[in-house]
Image (cartoon, grey):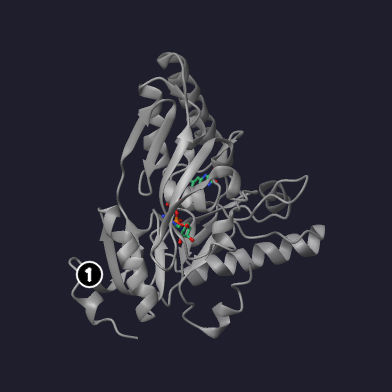
């Protein structure tokens, strides 16, 4: 693997602790790390990584991805571009645009359709990747199309209807894995500013009432199983408030794991593992992780806990 070309890339950092770049505050070092404000160079960078065999990991805001303690091999790339523009009932977001910012800006300008994004503290790129959603809205419901870069550096727009969205799922986790989302274009509809603002604030208030707020978490740890809620099962299993090292299952909402005191990824995975075992043995339901894992575990014992 030749990385000479990359070592000369402006702004490249080596052995960068990724805990610094994640809202969750956890994560081992990346061999190489870049923050890019300029989407125009992403295609070239992706193509050159592919040609030279450099593994590439895309980072968003770190509100859903747990970066493991062994860190990330190759290049970790964070797309920072945060543009948001609205024309003819379509809002175009760059990959780094944060959904709460987008929801607030759209509400302030009297555009409805993205109120649900107010409580999803992630980037537009990652939210398309994972079909984020809340309070009855989701990416699938309003994405017109998104621009992506393939591993060979070719760029194209894919219609929302062709993204095979499902519950926190999309093609970008399957046949288009390795594609990087650059932009998303969402349908919005003109509405009264005060009404859109009121709806946005109602969503925000409901989240603050029912979920941990102002603490470090990755949102829902597990997907809801068919016909039930992961949080209800975890609470019924007596897991709310359970701790391991610096990580704790939220006493307020048992599907949230918090980084309360310099937790490691191993602490979080130990709780994930224990919670899943407990729910399976009590209710015969196998919970599927919603949080995603990036990088490498620091030990074989932790590797055994990284099942989907
Ligand atoms: C308090 C709290 C509440 C939350 N509530 C919700 C909720 O209601 N609904 C919901 O859906 N989620 C929720 N989440 C989870 C999270 O905010 C979303 O999943 C969000 O979309 C993740 O965005 P991110 O930028 O933080 O992604 P990250 O966690 O940084 O990354 C997630 C994945 O996306 C990939 N990725 C990142 N950027 C790109 C890109 N440009 N192209 C391709 N792949 C990319 C990464 O490689 C990684 O695999 C919540 C999280 C928290 C902390």
State whether residue 154 is above or below residue 116: below
Query: In the picture provided, is 238 more to the left or to the right than 217?
Result: right
The residue sitting at 59% across, 59% down in the picture is 242
Secondary structure beneath label 1: loop
Most foreground residue, 257 or 154: 154
Pointer 1 local density, CA inside 10 Å: few below 14, some 14–19, many at least 20: some
Q: Point out residue 130 in the picture as x, y percentages from the top left corner.
A: 54, 52
From the image, tell me which residue sits under label 1.
Answer: 12
Q: Position of residue 307 (x, y in %)?
A: 63, 71
Residue 207 vertical placement versus 269 (above, below): above
Residue 291: name its quadrant: bottom right
Q: Is residue 26 visible?
A: no
- Which residue is located at x 37 percent, y 28 percent? 87
Across and down, in percent, residue 112 comes to 48, 24
* x 28%, y 81%: residue: 3
Left or right: residue 249 versus residue 88 is right
The quadrant of the image that shows the C terminus is: bottom right
Quadrant into which the N terminus falls: bottom left
Residue sitting nearer the eye, 156 or 293:
156
Please say if 21 is above or below 228: below
Does 186 sit left or right of 98 as displayed?
A: right
State the residue in front, 181 or 238: 181
Please determine whether, in this image, residue 2 is positioned above or below residue 190: below
């Amino acid at each position: 693997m030749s990385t000479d070309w990359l070592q000369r890339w402006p702004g490249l950092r080596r052995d960068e602790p990724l805990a610094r770049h994640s809202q969750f505050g956890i994560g081992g070092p990346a061999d190489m790390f870049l923050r890019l404000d300029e989407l125009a160079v992403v295609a070239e960078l992706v193509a050159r990584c592919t040609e030279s065999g450099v593994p590439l990991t895309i980072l968003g805001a770190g509100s859903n991805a747990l970066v493991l303690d062994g860190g990330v091999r190759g290049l970790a790339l964070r797309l920072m571009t945060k543009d948001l523009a609205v024309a003819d009932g379509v809002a175009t977001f760059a990959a780094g645009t944060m959904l709460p910012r987008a929801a607030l800006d759209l509400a302030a300008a009297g555009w409805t359709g993205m109120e649900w994004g107010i409580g999803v503290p992630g980037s537009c790129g990652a939210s398309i990747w994972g079909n984020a959603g809340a309070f009855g809205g989701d990416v699938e419901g309003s994405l017109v199309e998104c621009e992506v870069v393939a591993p060979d550096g070719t760029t194209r727009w894919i219609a929302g209807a062709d993204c095979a969205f499902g519950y926190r799922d999309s093609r970008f986790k399957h046949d288009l894995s390795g594609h990087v989302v650059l932009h998303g274009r969402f349908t919005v509809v003109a509405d009264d500013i005060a009404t859109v603002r009121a709806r946005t604030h109602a969503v925000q208030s409901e989240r603050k009432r029912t979920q941990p707020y102002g603490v470090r978490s990755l949102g829902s740890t597990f997907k809801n199983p068919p016909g039930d809620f992961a949080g209800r099962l975890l609470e019924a299993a007596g897991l709310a408030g359970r701790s391991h090292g610096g990580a704790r299952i939220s006493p307020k909402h048992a599907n949230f794991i918090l980084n309360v005191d310099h937790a490691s990824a191993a602490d979080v995975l130990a709780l994930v593992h224990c919670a899943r075992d407990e729910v399976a043995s009590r209710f015969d339901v196998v919970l599927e992780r919603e949080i995603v894992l990036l990088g490498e575990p620091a030990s074989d014992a932790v590797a055994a806990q990284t099942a989907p």
